[in-house]
Image (cartoon, helix red, strand yellow):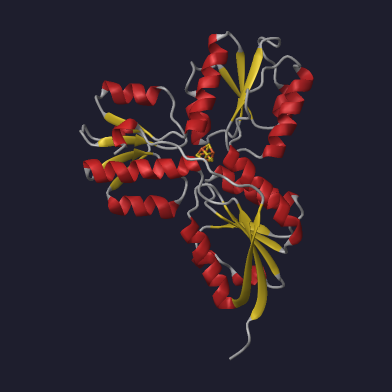
Amino acid sequence: MTKKRPLEIILCAPRGFCAGVDRAIQIVELALEKYGAPVYVRHEIVHNKYVVDGLREKGAVFVEELDEIPDTDAPVIFSAHGVPKSVPANAKERKMFYLDATCPLVSKVHVEAQRHFDEGKEIVLIGHAGHPEVIGTMGQLPDGAITLIETVEDAEKFEPKSPDDLAFVTQTTLSVDDTAAIVAALQKRFPSISAPHKEDICYATTNRQEAVKQVAPHVDAMVVVGAPNSSNSMRLVEVADRAGCPKSGLIQRASDIVWSDFEGVNKLGISAGASAPEELVNEIIEKFGEHYEITVSTKVTAEENIAFNVPRELRA
Ligand code: SF4
């Protein structure tokens, strides 16, 4: 038998599930337990196929819009990313029983945007066009009330109607560094722009990026366990690249590993996006263990102890 080549794995911590994702999954599971199948879920509850497939097997039915749901007494759950105001309004009109799994940290951004609007401010949202969270946040206010800014160039070109009465909010899962550059560009042009009281980029995004930033310069490659439609997973890959890691990429499942990509890699960093369960991290580590003589250590850069309550209807 040929001897396996050694591979040192450094696990980034924190990684993987955040409190908002954990709560959203619990909401679907508790709803299935309490009300039985089917339970309808608008949009992927969290951006992870493994999680979505597991819930589908238990009886969750995933749809993109409410009009795909027949008239029903079954619960309808809104995903962790948040929804435009028109969605609960439509659910009410249709007398649907709905449960909102929007992460409380996304709801906090919705409340902020509403407050700025009520104060008569013009609002800028820093985020990625088309992401469900951005659609949800923009949909808290009438069309045209929020301008989306995605880049520093957008910030430099932005022509507000009320330059002295501006406020900004952000998507929760952005790159901390990119966002700081966009905010700096806005503040340079509009010094009186109101900022969030407390950072909109959430603790989970910030902590996962910081862990990757600290590990990435010391490894030959970085694997981020997560899905391509998961904003915070994609940002972790970018953070690893920028921190000087020669190779970094997303892996959804162990079966996706392309072994030739790891030729010459002696030290491997592993992290996981906020919607990626630890089972998938373990599955990937095991797979590396079949091919290499692995040693695994963990680099802890922050401790997390945040948990969010599920809606009242689902509490025991
Ligand atoms: S990544 Fe942040 S905002 Fe998104 S669900 Fe998790 S805690 Fe909430």
Q: Quadrant of the C terminus?
A: top left
33 to the left or right of 168:
left
Q: Is residue 144 above or below residue 205?
A: above
Residue 295: x percent and y percent?
63, 72
Q: Quadrant of residue 205?
A: top right
Percent coordinates x, y for residue 240 in the rendering? 69, 52
Above or below 160: residue 278: below
Q: Position of residue 108 (x, y in %)?
A: 52, 26
Name which residue lies at 37% across and 53% down.
Answer: 53
User: On the rendered structure, is 315 left or right of 297?
Assistant: left
Residue drawn at the location 58% of the way across and 36% of the way down: 202
- Residue 110 shows in the view: yes
Q: How many marks?
A: 0
Q: Can the viewer see residue 44 in this picture?
A: no
Give the residue displayed 62% in from the left and 38% down from the top: 174
Residue closer to the observer: 24 or 89: 24
Height in image: 190 above or below 313?
above
Residue nearest the observer in this picture, 47 or 149: 47
Q: Quadrant of residue 244?
A: bottom right
Q: Name the residue at the bottom extreme.
A: 1
Q: Nearer the viewer, residue 93 or 276?
A: 276
Q: Is residue 74 above or below residue 57?
A: above
Q: Quadrant of the N terminus?
A: bottom right
Residue 118 image position (x, y, % from top left): 53, 10
For this orientation, the residue located farthest to the right is 188
| Side (left or right) of 309 relative to 306 | left
Residue drawn where x is 31% and y is 43% of the image? 30
